[in-house]
């Protein structure tokens, strides 16, 4: 997906993925808040407000994979790391969602394809399909066009992607919670950690208690009746039960 983002905006999307920062935190990030020598990003404002969305400031590390993107972004004009085209602060309604979904479509991260006829005036449109290759139009035999349907992902969902990918990689929940700057670990795992059944399976497969010493089928058939007989005998000889039976016989 990053390779399909326009070059000018690629550092912005890369920083969102590598840090989990919010849209407003990225829009208000100053160059003075980025220290590449120490490998730190100071997050403490959102847009032009002197505080983040939830009022929680924090330090985020600059990992080696993110460093080239930030070095490019720091060469932008003005004091902002991710300004608009003229160096001003980005508008809050900047179409980052639309840019993201177009990149997803070009990268093949789609839910399906709609096959449309290329001939003007034909109007044929097929139901969404999983196949990207389209044949001839059944109405006019002209070539069909496969229009990709990207996954409906918004720019704020990149924060979810950061958390999910970290959890999939086996990063402890406490670390993911620190990255997202959340106070409740349950909120981090339930809302931001979109793990699938295969992820849970791989996690459970890490458990290993050694070779299992299980009885064979014959031993199971023999031991089961003995266990029931012992339980019945123990019940018949229980003092409390005998007392109850004697009391029931006197009434």
Image: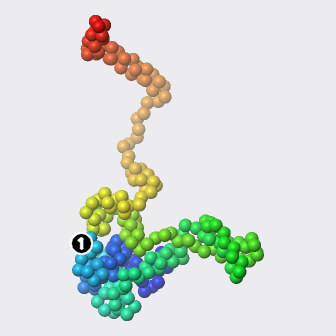
Residue 22 vs 164, above or below: the answer is below
Q: Is residue 205 left or right of residue 180?
A: right
Nearer to us in this view, 171 or 216: 171
> Which residue in the structure is indicated by mark 1?
55
Q: Is residue 247 left or right of residue 211?
A: left
Residue found farthest to the right = 140
> From this viewpoint, is residue 202 visible?
no
Q: Residue at x 26, y 78 (%)?
A: 45
Q: Is residue 93 left or right of residue 151?
A: left
Nearer to us in this view, 160 or 1: 160
Residue 126 vs 46, above or below: the answer is above
Helix, strand or loop at label 1? It is loop
Give how far across and how far down residue 168 sits, in percent.
40, 61
Give how far across and how far down residue 41 sits, in percent.
27, 78
> Which corner quadrant of the image does residue 111 belong to?
bottom right
Nearer to us in this view, 119 or 163: 119
Q: Quadrant of the C terminus?
A: top left
Residue found farthest to the top = 250
> Which corner quadrant of the image does residue 85 belong to?
bottom left
Neighbour tally class for label 1: few under 14, some 14-19, many 20 plus, Cα within 10 Å? few
Give how far across and how far down residue 232 sits, in percent.
37, 17
Q: Residue at x 27, y 68 (%)?
A: 181
> Which corner quadrant of the image does residue 63 belong to?
bottom left
> From this viewpoint, is residue 140 visible?
yes
């Amino acid at each position: 997906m990053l390779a399909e983002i326009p070059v000018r905006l690629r550092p912005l999307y890369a920083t969102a993925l590598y840090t989990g920062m919010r849209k407003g935190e990225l829009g208000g990030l100053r160059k003075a808040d980025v220290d590449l020598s120490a490998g730190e990003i100071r997050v403490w404002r959102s847009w032009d407000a002197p505080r983040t969305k939830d009022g929680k400031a924090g330090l985020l590390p600059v990992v080696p994979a993110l460093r080239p993107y930030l070095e490019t972004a720091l060469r932008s004009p003005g004091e902002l790391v991710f300004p608009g085209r003229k160096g001003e602060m980005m508008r809050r309604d900047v179409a980052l969602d639309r840019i993201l979904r177009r990149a997803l479509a070009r990268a093949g991260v789609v839910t399906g394809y709609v096959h449309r006829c290329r001939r003007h005036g034909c109007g044929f449109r097929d139901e969404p399909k999983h196949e990207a290759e389209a044949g001839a139009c059944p109405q006019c035999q002209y070539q069909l066009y496969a229009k990709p349907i990207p996954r409906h992902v918004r720019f704020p969902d990149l924060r979810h992607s950061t958390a999910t990918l970290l959890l999939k990689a086996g990063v402890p929940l406490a670390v993911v919670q620190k990255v997202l700057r959340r106070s409740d670990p349950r909120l981090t795992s339930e809302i931001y950690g979109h793990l699938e059944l295969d992820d849970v399976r791989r996690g459970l497969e890490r458990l290993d208690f050694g070779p299992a010493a299980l009885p064979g089928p014959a031993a199971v058939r023999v031991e089961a009746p003995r266990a029931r007989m012992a339980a019945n005998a123990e019940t018949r000889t229980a003092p409390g039960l005998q007392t109850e039976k004697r009391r029931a016989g006197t009434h």
